Image: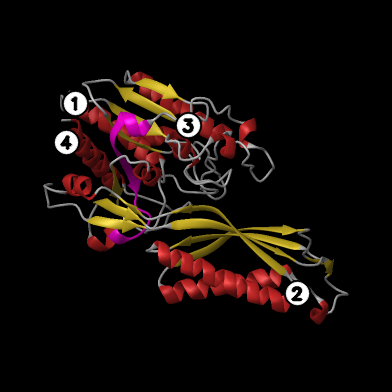
């Protein structure tokens, strides 16, 4: 089957031999190779490829009239990420086109397959950057100044041409297939599910400043140690999230001067917070900030918190979700929420009726080399996407 062949082609691209994880950051060799792979697959199917100055791609099956149906996902990964997050949706979309043609389907309106860049925000720190620019939710003037960990500006690796594709005017609905990033479908013993919405979430930079000093000669009571403030703030975040039944993660850290025998002068940490309501998110981040600030006062340090990106609650089109989930062999697909962010959330916020199809993840592990989906479930996902697109293209 075409899906299995494509998956074999994708498997080695950007894979680290030691960890088994993937490094497919935007505007690096592996990600560029993946975009070239997508272009070749589209050309082999006679699809018309549209590319903007950022690297976003949409391949069109020109047929019928009216506003298009759009599907697809992304090809970039988190640092040392899994194989399925993103590429599964792209390969499945191409395989679904093959299946639709095998069924003899003639779409009554155009079908597009989209690949949006920098979905993970793993290089320039802004999640779903490509889709934000594609729908005009973020301006190039703002985005071009974003810098990666090496200080390279986005404007130095992309030219920023033709970014706003006015998708809200051209697209009638968007369906993104994605590996589930949790265990809901496993617990339900279901291979396929449909998303009801996305939890509100945000990324916040915690800058803690203190005084650099000698690790051996400086008495403990004389220190102004930002690492201590950060450590207690991280513990507070864990406790507050657990008490509230929400999510708080410090997963990235930058320390200066970063010496083994020196008390640091600065610790910068990034908090990823996700909650079931916008009010709960604001309350959780506010409480973590309050506790961190109080600890800084005791440590003789200073804490500044900056919200780098915040996304509100996304409620996917309920009628579209029910339409896709209903009347399948074996029963209706379950409709479930997710706490993970996706390009689908950006397109939904831009006014495009949007749905997501999830493929079962047997362990629930994601953003990790251990991320997985069984081949049988992936093929079920291709069939499910083809069924959904056929309904929408009729």
Which of the pair 74/229 is nearer the observer?
Answer: 229
The residue at the point 21 percent across, 21 percent down is 64
For the magenta stretch, what is the residue range?
167-184
Residue 176: in sight, yes or no? Answer: yes
In the rendered image, the quadrant that contains the N terminus is top left
Of helix, strand and loop, which one carries label 4? helix
Q: Is residue 385 above or below residue 65?
A: below
The residue at the point 37 percent across, 19 percent down is 43
Q: Position of residue 32 (x, y in %)?
A: 53, 30
Nearest to N terminus: mark 4 or mark 3 = 3
Q: Nearer the viewer, mark 4 or mark 3?
A: 4
Relative side of 68 to 267, left or right: left
Q: CA distance from mark 4 to mark 3?
A: 30 Å
Residue 180 shown in magenta: yes
Of helix, strand and loop, which one carries label 1? helix
Q: Nearer the viewer, mark 2 or mark 1?
A: 2
Q: Position of residue 222 (x, y in %)?
A: 83, 78
> Do the residues bearing badges 2 and 3 touch, measured as CB atoms within 8 Å?
no
Nearest to N terminus: mark 1 or mark 3 = 3
Residue under numbered circle 4:
391
Q: CA distance from mark 2 to mark 1?
A: 69 Å
Residue under numbered circle 1:
102
Residue under numbered circle 3:
34
10 Å crowding of disc 1: few (<14), some (14-19), many (20+) = few
Image quadrant in which you'd find residue 381: top left
Q: Position of residue 124 (x, y in %)?
A: 58, 43
Q: CA distance from mark 1 to mark 3?
A: 26 Å
Nearest to N terminus: mark 1 or mark 4 = 1
Relative side of 128 to 330, left or right: right
């Amino acid at each position: 089957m075409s899906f299995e062949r494509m998956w074999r082609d994708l498997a080695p691209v950007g894979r680290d031999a030691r960890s088994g994880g993937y490094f497919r950051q935007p505007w690096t060799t592996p990600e560029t190779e993946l975009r070239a792979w997508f272009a070749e697959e589209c050309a082999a199917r006679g699809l018309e490829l549209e590319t903007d100055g950022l690297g976003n791609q949409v391949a069109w099956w020109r047929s019928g009239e009216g506003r298009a149906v759009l599907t697809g996902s992304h090809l970039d990964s988190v640092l040392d990420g899994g194989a399925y997050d993103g590429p599964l949706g792209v390969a499945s979309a191409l395989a679904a086109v093959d299946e639709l043609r095998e069924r003899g389907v003639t779409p009554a309106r155009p079908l597009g397959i989209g690949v949006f860049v920098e979905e993970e925000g793993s290089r320039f720190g802004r999640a779903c950057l490509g889709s934000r620019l594609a729908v005009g939710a973020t301006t190039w003037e703002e985005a071009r100044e974003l810098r990666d960990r090496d200080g390279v500006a986005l404007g130095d690796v992309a030219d920023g041409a033709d970014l706003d594709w006015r998708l809200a005017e051209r697209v009638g609905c968007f369906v993104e297939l994605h590996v589930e990033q949790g265990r809901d479908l496993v617990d339900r013993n279901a291979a396929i599910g449909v998303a009801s919405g996305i939890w509100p979430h945000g990324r916040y930079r915690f800058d803690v400043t203190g005084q650099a000093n000698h690790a051996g000669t400086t008495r403990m009571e004389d220190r102004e140690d930002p690492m201590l403030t950060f450590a207690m703030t991280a513990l507070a975040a864990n406790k507050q999230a657990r008490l509230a039944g929400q999510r708080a993660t410090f997963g990235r850290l930058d320390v200066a001067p970063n010496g083994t025998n020196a008390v640091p002068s600065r610790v910068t940490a990034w908090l990823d917070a996700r909650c079931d309501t916008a009010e709960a998110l604001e309350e959780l981040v506010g409480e973590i900030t309050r506790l961190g600030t109080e600890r800084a006062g005791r440590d003789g340090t200073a804490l500044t918190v900056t919200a780098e990106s915040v996304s509100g609650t996304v409620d996917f089109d309920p009628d579209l979700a029910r339409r896709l989930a209903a009347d399948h062999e074996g029963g209706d697909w379950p409709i479930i929420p997710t706490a993970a962010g996706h390009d689908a959330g950006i397109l939904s916020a831009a006014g495009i009726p949007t749905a997501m199809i999830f493929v079962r993840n047997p362990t629930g592990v994601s953003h990790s080399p251990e991320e997985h989906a069984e081949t049988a479930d992936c093929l079920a996902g291709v069939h499910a996407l083809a069924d959904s697109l056929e309904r929408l293209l009729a």
